[in-house]
Amino acid sequence: MIDSRQVLRYRTHVQQLDREHGTAADTAVLDLGVQDTGPDGAMWALAVRGADIAEEDLVWLWTLRGAPHAYRRADMAAVAAAVAPWSDADAAKRIFDASKPLKAAGIPVLEALDTVAAEMKRIVTAPMVKGEMSTRLHEALPEPYQRYCRSCDAVHLYEMPFRLAAVHAGLELEAHTSPPVLKPVKGFKPAKAFPQRLDPVRAYLHLCGPATVKEVAEYLDSPVKEVKAHWPADAVEIDVAGEQRWILAGDEAALRGADAEAVRLVGPYDLLLQSRDRKLLVDDPAKAKALWPVLGRPGAVLAGGRIAGLWRPRKSGKKFTVLLEPWEQSLDRQAIGVEAERLAAFRGTALTAVEYAD
């Protein structure tokens, strides 16, 4: 029987958290996209995997779940095809409540996304702040595309159609901008096909398997029925701690033989923590609540083939400290120190101390 520790060892290896060096071409998580949320976002996720990648070789796009993700720039056209909704039902699920007024107005959701993308492409001919583009879209599109935003006290476009249409308009996000700045990619056209490695269902099963259909659907914000219809023919059932899950047939041997036990400080939105089987990763409810709070997520300490604690960075003036909350007394503090030094170097500062909570 496969247990949770074996699963985490497999994911540690297949997500390349146990390697020291890599390139854009051989960094597997770029196939699914590397979420770029917070100061220790996509670039830290790549750094902790030893990936030496120049930012100009990457492209930032709003894709799965409307979140910003980094991909290989050379893959952009294929990524646009890979992350596109499969059907009107799929598109409706991905844009949540924005689908209701469109349906009421008799506008198919896929058609609506195409309309938003066309307007975005027309409007954005040079780098543009999100707020300005939102204002221009508000002026250009009719009522079914709009909503009243209580926090802004204004009427503007629903958020998810705005985000999901951007990649099909050929718009990339300028890295590390807040508020987001979008700019056009010269000569961009979505591809008509994409390689298997960019298929988000296959990529999830490969990188976050073994998984259930429901978990994949939740990750993609897609209906379970749609995910089942696009389920890989070479996925095989496997028992994980008494539960039936699925993995690509070509990965089963790697799962059974996985022994990776790297020590890493993974970021709050690292793919390792993004799988939808949180109970498998952390079975203690109190610890899970601490790792995945509603606001202000910490990073996770990966050690010994399990999530072994929490970490948070603290910067005050020239002082940079990493605060550790260990869940196990046997943590290798020397290895943690090495990883904290790596984080400080990534942040462009010197490490002052690693402090352990009582």
Image (spheres, rainbow, N blue to C red):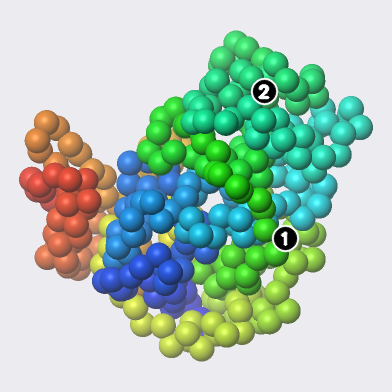
The relative height of residue 351 versus residue 6 in the rendered view (above or below) is above
Relative horizontal placement of residue 179, taking residue 90 as reference (left or right): left
Task: Please name whichever residue, 282 or 142, is drawn nearer the observer in this view of the structure.
Answer: 142
Residue depicted at 10% across the width and 47% down the height: 350
The residue closer to the viewer here, 97 or 329, is 97
Q: Is mark 1 on a helix, strand or loop?
A: loop
Task: Give the label on residue 137, or none.
Answer: 2
Q: Distance between the residues labelled 1 and 2?
A: 27 Å
Whether residue 285 is visible here, answered yes or no, is no
Q: Residue furthest right?
A: 106
Name the residue at 37% across, 47% down. 41
Q: Position of residue 40 (x, y in %)?
A: 32, 46
Residue 284 at what x, y percent from top left?
42, 57
**What residue is at 68 percent from the left and 19 percent from the top?**
138
Which residue is disc 1 drawn over? Answer: 192
Please state which amino acid type lies under the numbered disc 2: Leu
How packed mark 1 is, by other alpha carbons closer than 10 Å (few <14, some 14-19, many 20 or more), is: few
Amino acid type at circle 1 is Lys
Q: Which of marks 1 and 2 is nearer the N terminus?
A: 2
From the viewer's perspective, is 358 left or right of 124? left
